[in-house]
Amino acid sequence: MADVIEVGAARDDAPPPAGRARRRGATERGHRATPYLFLAPYLVLFLVFGLAPIVFGVWISLHQWDLQLPNRPFIGLENYRDLFSSDSADYADWWSSVRATAIFTVLSVPLLVVVPLGLALLLNEKFPGRTFFRAAFFAPYVLGVAVIGLLWRFLLDANLGLINRLLGAVGLPADTPWVTDVPWAWVSLVGVTVWWTCGFNAVIYLAGLQDIPAELYEAAKVDGASAWDRFRHVTLPGLRPVLLFVLTTTILASANVFGQSFLITQGAPGEQTRTVVWRIVDEGLRNYDVGQASAMSVLFALLLAVVSIVNFRLFRYRED
Amino acid sequence: MTNVRRVARYTALVLITAVFVTPLVWMALTSLKTYDDAQQDPPSWLPNPFSTYGYDQILGNTANPVLRWFLNSMLAASLHTLLVLVTASMAAYALARLRFRGRKLSFALIVGTLFLPPTSLIIPNFVIADRLGWIDTLTVIVVPGAASAFGVFFLRQFFLSIPAELEEAAVLDGANHWQVFSRVLLPLSKPALATLAVLSFLTNWNDFLWPVYVLFSPERLTLPAGLGLLQGAYVTDYPVIMAGAVLASVPVLILFVLAQRHIIQGVSRSGLKG
């Protein structure tokens, strides 16, 4: 904070210059309140919809809280215990959704970390058309999940979809159940997500690549390093903070997957592709059991926090 | 050698571009087909004949008022963007330029929530919005998302990168904080404000989960929430469904073409500073 430049009279610790002492003195109280007035509009929003929900969510999770019932008795950790005891009604659905989310995350994250890096390397030199290609790669990302969900449900339709028809046209099997059976449903969900979001990660990598000093590459070249050596010993170390950011945000994004499975596989087959976030909102906002849903939410947020912390730790150690 | 490399590079780039763009082209072409045309096997690329069937179906539709959803989305995303710009820029000014008790604490709290997955707040936020009587209104689409810490964080970083001399000069000329903020700092921050505006609009326009669960009345839905209904109502009548998808894509694609630089810069900056 030491580098923050304070403007004029905002400095509490220094007396205001004599020239405007009178003016400022007259409005001393208003001037003290000024910072809070600037902060207030956002702070109200933040307190009500950013901070309070964190505390409130934990509070709700400790109650038997049904939106349709007037009584909300305190039940301690029972909502949490239900998620771990195999005889509770929620147990099977909950762990099935955790499994689905884990499968999706494990399959999608490596691709979403590696493929965009490849794209960024392709775009990392100045050549005619570079801006155009970057825009083309990024374009799917500006569309919402509703659009890409509907679009890919259509493209992956077993009978009418373009994908099976193209495969048939080149003599491959044309009846793959892309959205109704495993493992195809996972291939579809992961593939669509990579198609949709890899331009986003590529743009982040590209910015990181441009921050690596060109002299490092020159020096490596002079030393006779091959392209692969330069990638391993210059590019990757230079990208480490960006890699950490991409990895962490991608894990969080993948773990929070909802729209793709809601629209493309619609949970099929059975409920095998129904994810944690979907499970939570259904439990809370369709079945009205917000107590149970909040317990799931808190547990899930804690799990993701652990993943992020582990991530940071691993990367720090490797840096030392 | 370099020529071979150049050809290889462009070949790869063109193929990759085809992978990203073909589905979008297919969406647009299908929206211009008749029902029968879209069912053909093997499929025809170009509509034969070109038809406005899909658009006729959704625009004159009372059960699924797609045009209404479009306007709802437009209004919600615009108001949301305005709310974010006003509240985030004022807060960022206080945090970047003013000294006050509790500044470090409030900044730490705000930044802390950046790392929280937003989905973890959905249940309590629904209960809060319910108590405020906002469920199934436009307000619930406009307001709660503006609590996001991103805008404040993003603008604060930008304000800190602007030298304070101009503002100090304005203070010496007798300007108060509001004047310094609105007449000196904001005009200097146009690129950052444009980036934040575009990103806020995109996020709100595309938001899917929240509207699906907090809006119920058919005439109050946003376009993404409504598209889900359209899929249920038209099942395999793909020209109609794709017409709806095109309608939801056109505004953001136009925005992307016009403000590509802002979007890409906003994304790269969020990566480096995050």
Image (tube, coloured by chain):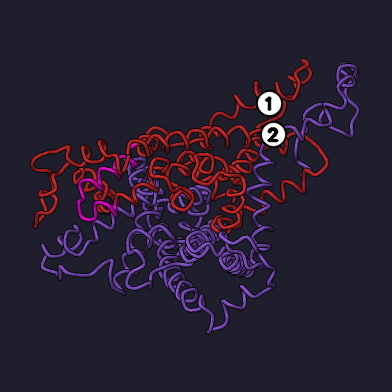
Provide the letter of the chain coloured purple: A
Horizontal side of B185 relative to A236 (left or right) equals right
The magenta stretch is: B231-250
In the rendered image, which residue does mark 2 sit on? B93
Query: Which chain does the residue under circle 1 lie in?
Result: B
Whether A13 is drawn above or below B176: the answer is below
Chain B in the picture: what colour? red
Q: Are marks 2 and 1 in contact (CB under 8 Å)?
A: yes
Q: Residue at x 54, y 80 (%)?
A: A88
x then y, percent, for residue B149: 62, 46
x then y, percent, for residue A254: 46, 62
In the rendered image, which residue does mark 1 sit on? B181
Which is the main secondary structure of the residues drawn in magenta? helix
Q: Quadrant of residue A174?
A: bottom left
Whether A34 is drawn above or below B62: the answer is above
Q: What is the spatial separation of the Cα atoms under label 2 and label 1, in whole angstroms?
A: 7 Å
x then y, percent, for residue A10: 81, 30
Horizontal side of B212 relative to B142 (left or right) equals left
Q: Nearer the viewer, residue A316 or A24?
A: A24
**Does residue A179 appear in this view?**
yes
Q: Nearer the viewer, residue B101 or B96?
A: B101
